[in-house]
Image: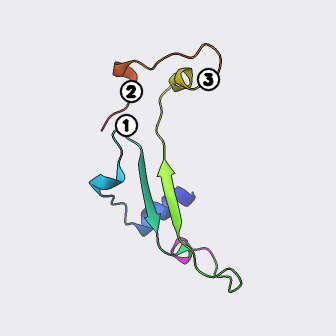
Amino acid sequence: EILERGLKVREYELRRDNFSATGNFGFGIQEHIDLGIKYDPSIGIYGLDFYVVLGRPGYNVAHRKRKSGTVGFQHRLTK
């Protein structure tokens, strides 16, 4: 839900620079009140950064502690 609001603030448009070589993407917003969150004077205004990591079934093989393996080239996500 909050990712959807963040993309709506950015008008669902991201630059090419926002994407990594593995298909992950990230973007930031300047003010949290753009998301529809109420303003609290004691906190002030702050920005938010969003970063989305994409994966496929079987990606855990490369990150698990026991019997770790590699993800094949055909199974990796690319631009």
Q: Contact (CB < 8 A) between labels 2 and 1?
A: yes
In the depicted view, which residue is nearer to us: 65 or 39? 65
- Spatial CA distance of label 2 from label 3 is 17 Å
Magenta part, dominant SS? helix
Amino acid found under the numbered disc labelled 2: Arg
Q: Which residue is mark 1?
A: 22
Q: Which residue is mark 3?
A: 64
Q: Is residue 25 toward the left or the right of residue 45 in the image?
A: left
Amino acid found under the numbered disc labelled 3: Arg
| Range covered by the magenta-colored residues | 33-37
- Spatial CA distance of label 1 from label 3 is 19 Å
Determine the residue positioned at 41% across, 43% down: 24
Mark earlier in primary sequence (2, 1): 1
Amino acid found under the numbered disc labelled 1: Thr
* Residue 20, x across and y down, in percent: 36, 44
From this viewpoint, which residue is outermost toward the top?
A: 67
Q: Quadrant of residue 35?
A: bottom right
Image quadrant where one finds the N terminus: bottom right
* Residue 45, x across and y down, in percent: 58, 80
Q: Which mark is residue 76?
A: 2
Question: Is disc 2 surrounded by few (<14), some (14 to 19) or many (20+) residues within 10 Å?
Answer: few
Determine the residue positioned at 34% across, 20% down: 74
